[in-house]
Image (cartoon, rainbow, N blue to C red):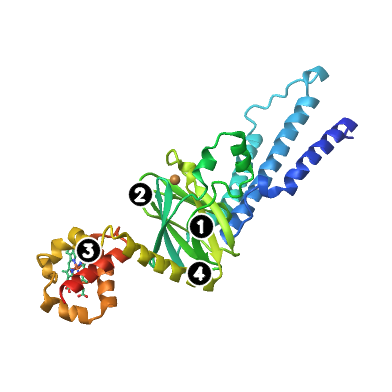
Amino acid sequence: MISKRVQYFLAAMISALAPALAGAERYNLQTPQTIIAHEIYDLHTLIFLICCAIFVVVFGMMTYSILKHRKSLGHKAEQFHENTMVEIAWTVVPFIILIGMAIPATKTVIAMKDTSNPDITIKATGHQWKWGYDYLQEGVSFYSSLATPRDLVTDQSPEGRKKREGYANYLLEVDNPVVVPVGKKVRIITTANDVIHAWWVPAFGVKQDAIPGFVRDTWFRADKTGIYRGQCAELCGKEHGFMPIVVEVVEQDKYVQWVAEQKKKTAANAAASGAMDGKGVYDKYCLACHGAGVAGAPKLGDKAAWAPRIKQGSDLLYAHALKGFKAMPPKGGATDLPDAQIKAAVDYLAAAAK
Ligand code: HEC
Ligand SMILES: [Cu+2]
């Protein structure tokens, strides 16, 4: 029989654990919002339970043996060196347990890596210390930076601390969130501009390093609309904690609307900035070929060469300049420039031949 004291102890343990179990969200993984996140969650639970079972069996046996066979009870040590049965058992049993854990884990890892047939592809570029996003099909590009006010972060006064405590989504909010449609497979391509960062959104079960000079990818399909938050998960410098990720999952029609708005903004920004207008891009990237007519490139201002090309319509000219056309390389080699700037250079070339 279990003594009264042990019973009290167990009761105390359970009542101490109860609130932890009730508020699971705080102590456990975030509520999963994608198939992969569900699989990871279940795997985590399964393996945790296996660990608990092993813990109970091993420590139970140890405790029992220590108590029951102690010297003060007059016990003599048993000699069973080189007991083949025992040695086989303690090799085979862990092996079976490991295989039992590896099979479901491998299945999930393989599913995580299957980025084929996405509905949408977004390139996420890590910068010190913000994220840049390019929607590859939609042609939408923007930066996403921390929105929490700086003085709130640095305020060391007691009032400052109070304010921070009452502040929702402290260090987990951005000016421009990533917007994606619900139920669509979104492929995230990660890379970085300076040092290694990592794109991590726990509720989606997504964490992918963003490495300069390399391209990695991951995917998710959000089950529900809502706002999901994550962070850069690779120590990337002094502001590593200040480059959060916010993903807004919306209905398809809202998404279409957002893309349209975003495109307008991008165009307006390009027009307003003027930092590198069509001529600027031309001089820097296109002149080498289009200035001298290298490899049959139509020369700047050569009406005869440009007239039939301009006739094709600006959409086709844009497409050829962006994707490449015969000896014309994609974007004239300036692949890091946004589409809008290449288009401006095309406009400049076309206008010069009128
Ligand atoms: C490496 C040389 C090279 C560079 C750099 C280059 N081009 Fe070209 N481009 C060409 C050649 C060659 C053609 C002619 C292709 C053909 O029709 O055979 C061409 C054709 C074009 C055309 C006409 C496409 C059509 O439909 O006929 C456009 C527009 C154009 N380039 C835009 C640009 C812009 C904008 C840049 C700079 C961002 C640029 N090019 C940089 C070589 C270059
Ligand atoms: Cu980072």
Query: Is residue 51 among what the camera can see?
Result: yes
**Mark 2 and mark 3 residues within 8 Å of each other at the beta carbon:** no
Front label number (4 vs 2): 4
Mark 3: C-beta under 8 Å from nearest atom of ligand 1: yes
Q: Nearer the viewer, residue 31 or 101?
A: 31
Front label number (3 vs 1): 3
Q: Locate the N terminus and report the quarter of the image it occupies.
A: top right
What residue would you read off at disc 3?
Answer: 332
What residue would you read off at disc 2?
Answer: 193
Quick one: SS at disc 3? helix
Quick one: SS at disc 4? helix
Residue 33's x, y, as percent?
60, 59
Against 340, residue 160 (above or below) is above
Instruction: Please give left or right for residue 254 compared with residue 121 in the image.
Output: right
**Mark 4 and mark 2 residues within 8 Å of each other at the beta carbon:** no
What residue would you read off at disc 1?
Answer: 112
Lower position in the chain sequence, tag 4 or tag 2:
2
